[in-house]
Image: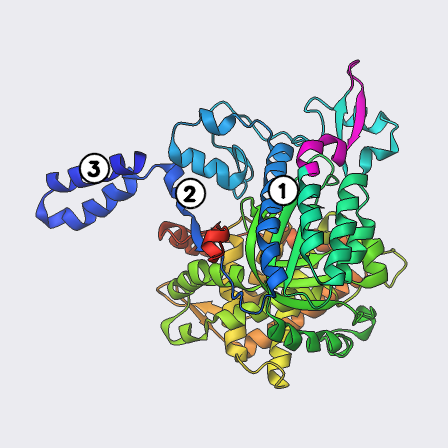
Amino acid sequence: MRKITAMVIAFGCLALVTTSCKEKKSTGSQEESKSEMQQKVEEYAYFDLTADLSKLSESERKLLPIFFEIGQIMDDLFWEQTFGDETLLDTITDPWVKEFALINYGPWDRLDAEKPFVSGYGPRPATANYYPQDITRAEYDAFADPLKSSHYTILTRDENGNLKTVGYYEAYKEKLDRVCELLDQAIEITDNPSMKKYLVERKKSLQTNDYYPSDMAWMDLRNSNLDFVFGPIENYDDAFNSVKTSWEAFVLVKDVDASTKLAKFVQMLPQLQKELPCDPAHKNYVPGTSSDMNLYDVVFYGGDCNAGGKTIAINLPNDDRVQAKKGSRRFQLRNAMQAKFDKIMKPIGEMIIEPSEQSNLSFDAFFWNVTFHEVAHGLGVKQTINGKGSVDEAMQTENSSWEEAKADIIGLNLVCNLIEKGEISDITVEEAITTYIVGLLRSVRFGASEAHGIANMMCYNYMFENGAFTRNGNGTYHINYEKARKAMEGWIALILKTQATGDFAFASQYSKDHGTIGPDLQKDLNRINKAGIPRDIRFRQGLDVLGVK
Ligand SMILES: [Zn+2]
């Protein structure tokens, strides 16, 4: 309804203006006629989640509808956790506001510091529904129940108003019982023993609130073209303690051939670690080669991973006991990456990079950069070399942003090295670097206030200050590939030195000085935003989109 009204107004204005300024005015009036909410919704470009299903076995095909239904329940459960008031959507009359609430799973803008956008709502409560909204830090600290810090309990109040813990199964019993019924069907259908084992264990986890055994079983999943990541997984949504896990689901179709090619790089990790351009003392960690790396197309996103900005790579499980025993599994989500490249990266690059270098912008380069960002998290240094304990602890509040900067720049360096060694042959070093710089511009639009944003800005500024790129008079970037190559080496050495020595004082001063958006970059970002280039993606998904009945 709103959309039609807006169009009528736009055409109405057109008729009134004089010929000479018609074009200018008409553009202006169309923009003005879009509500702020419509613009915000359209900052998420639509993308259809499809995949090549030809390799799926007959039983795998039969699992798809069951996994989709469970995924939808995970989605419903996430609403309950993060917002809860199901009547919200019915009370919203503006369809754009409603659409935006669906994208954000509630009335707070996830890509804009959780600002409320539905009238009547204040700031987002840090507790969401993981804790009572009136809980205080002192009350939480004084609460003696050891289960209070479990990933799989919520805190509520008993009849006397005292805090109590409730396990996830008990808290969400009705919906989880339905999931268990569906899992029974899937267990019956699958003819893959490792999938059967995983689903059996996952069902038990849902009922016992103990996810360790099913995470272990998931690590052993073999010879399956289909994967199903679901349950309470990440803790980002718990702004009170970063402990409570959020329900989510990914249904994934594996590209077996491409995954085999990726696997060979995991075997090369110890060698790649040795070749990092830094003081040998600052790369003392010995990376494992047991972890696998796989390429998937996602066909369903539900719950936490579908809220706001979308995940394009997964590294799970989070349980470090499982990681210590079995490593972790890395998933590169190719179709979601392709969506972000086509809808966001490419238009940004075409606007920002000087025309003669635009041919160096490529999806394959984006793919390799993201893939090796994940790999790079597993390289470098984990323990400080001067008795300050783990890097994580020593770096305190600087830890996340420096770790992200490390992964980013080492990832790029690995890609360049592997191209030079002939191991990656579908792109050039110039493509890797150009696409990387455009990628920094894409990410920094999410703001420079949190870890990834600060990391991006430190990388951007280091590259700029060391001549990796310069600005032409018209605002486009000219890249100096030789200087870029040197800059990445200098930046890696500096990051690893800071981490290895746990130098928090230096890290915090450096990120203050170099982790912010300067005036020139702000102008670039304004141009990008003004051009209406999407900030993220949202999905059309379902069995019908996938072409399955
Ligand atoms: Zn990362």
The picture quadrant where one finds residue 332 is: bottom right
543 left or right of 371? left
User: Residue drawn at (46%, 62%), measured in percent from left and top?
Assistant: 345
Q: Does the magenta stretch include residue 167?
A: yes
- Toward the viewer: 527 or 148? 148
Is residue 498 in view? no
Q: Does the magenta stretch include residue 307?
A: no
Q: Helix or strand or loop: what does disc 2 sit on?
A: helix
Instruction: Indicate which disc residue 8 carries.
Output: 3
- The x and y percentages for residue 127 are 68, 31
In which quadrant will I find the N terminus? top left
The numbered mark, 1 or 2, whose residue comes first in the sequence reads 2
134 left or right of 257? right
Count of numbered circles on the image: 3
Disc 2 residue: CB within 8 Å of ligand 1 = no
372 left or right of 114? right
Q: What residue type is labelled 2?
A: Val
Q: Do the residues labelled 1 and 2 touch (CB within 8 Å)?
A: no
**Which segment is the magenta one?**
158-177
User: Residue drawn at (87%, 55%), measured in percent from left and top?
Assistant: 388
Residue behind mark 2 = 41
178 left or right of 473? right
Residue behind mark 1 = 74
The numbered mark, 3 or 1, whose residue comes first in the sequence reads 3
Q: Marks 1/2: CA distance?
A: 23 Å
The picture quadrant where one finds residue 144 is: top right
Q: Which amino acid does label 1 sit on?
A: Met
